[in-house]
Image (cartoon, coloured by chain):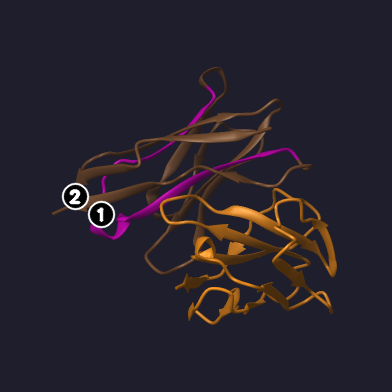
Amino acid sequence: EAGVVQSPRYKIIEKKQPVAFWCNPISGHNTLYWYLQNLGQGPELLIRYENEEAVDDSQLPKDRFSAERLKGVDSTLKIQPAELGDSAVYLCASSPGGKKSDTQYFGPGTRLTVL
Amino acid sequence: AQSVTQLGSHVSVSEGALVLLRCNYSSSVPPYLFWYVQYPNQGLQLLLKYTTGATLVKGINGFEAEFKKSETSFHLTKPSAHMSDAAEYFCAVSESLDNDMRFGAGTRLTVKP
């Protein structure tokens, strides 16, 4: 069974540029999460989807961040414009759904460097 | 709101020695507790989790953790460290079915030959 796929694995951009991250969850997983992981810290939830509905986006900085999961499968996280402080690893995770505390399966992450 | 404190950002042990990684949580309701491991340049992988029932939970790679309600702790142990155990370990807590996981800051485990 394929795991959670994320691309790109690494991205280097200049500040004020836009950037997008893509995530393909495990087949059949209804719940999808985007996390932000700063260096030396644990992951922090940005947004959670149940199918195509964003059910928890309270921690998503909506002035510059946006996310979508149009068909309830793949998801894209966008930052526009990027700031120096956005440099971090962006993790995607998925779970079968139904229970928020069910096991989450993580992708390898996208490491963003903003110059 | 729930929170997690991992005592010790870095732990170093010799190969074959006991591994003990500490985790204390704060939760207003019976918690769900998790330990994840993260190898360099990889995503997090679930080691074990406590939901209900037996308080001693066994996970993958020989790790286990014990839920102690009176101490609000969920420490991770392994009797004998291997070089391959070197990684970052994260404890996480979730309050039943209505909250998402909250992660600790992580503990980096180094295993010396």
Type of amino acid at the residue the image marks with label 2 = Glu
**Viewer-side residue, A57 vs B12:** A57
Give the magenta range. Answer: B72-96
The label on residue B55 is none
Q: Which quadrant is home to the C terminus of chain A?
A: bottom left
Please name the predominant secondary structure of the magenta segment in the image: strand
Residue at the (57%, 59%) spot, across then down: A36
Q: Is residue A31 left or right of residue A24?
A: right
- Residue B69 image offset from top left, x and y in percent: 57, 22
Q: Is residue B18 left or right of residue B1?
A: left
**Viewer-side residue, B102 vs A105:** B102
Type of amino acid at the residue the image marks with label 1 = His
Q: Within 10 Å of the Cα at label 2, are there few (<14), some (14-19), or many (20+) other Cα atoms?
A: some
Q: Which chain is brown?
A: B
The answer for which chain carries disc 1 is B
Residue at the (43%, 46%) spot, across then down: B106
How far is the residue under mark 1 from the one under mark 2?
5 Å
- Residue B92 image offset from top left, x and y in percent: 56, 43
Residue at the (61%, 59%) spot, across then down: A35
The label on residue B15 is 2
Q: Is residue A40 magenta?
A: no
Q: Are marks 1 and 2 in contact (CB under 8 Å)?
A: yes
Residue with the mark numbered 1: B82
Q: Which chain is orange?
A: A
N-terminal of the pair, mark 1 or mark 2, is: 2
Residue B36's place in the image compared with B56, above or below, is: below
SS class of the residue under badge 2? loop
Residue A78's place in the image compared with B7, above or below, is: below
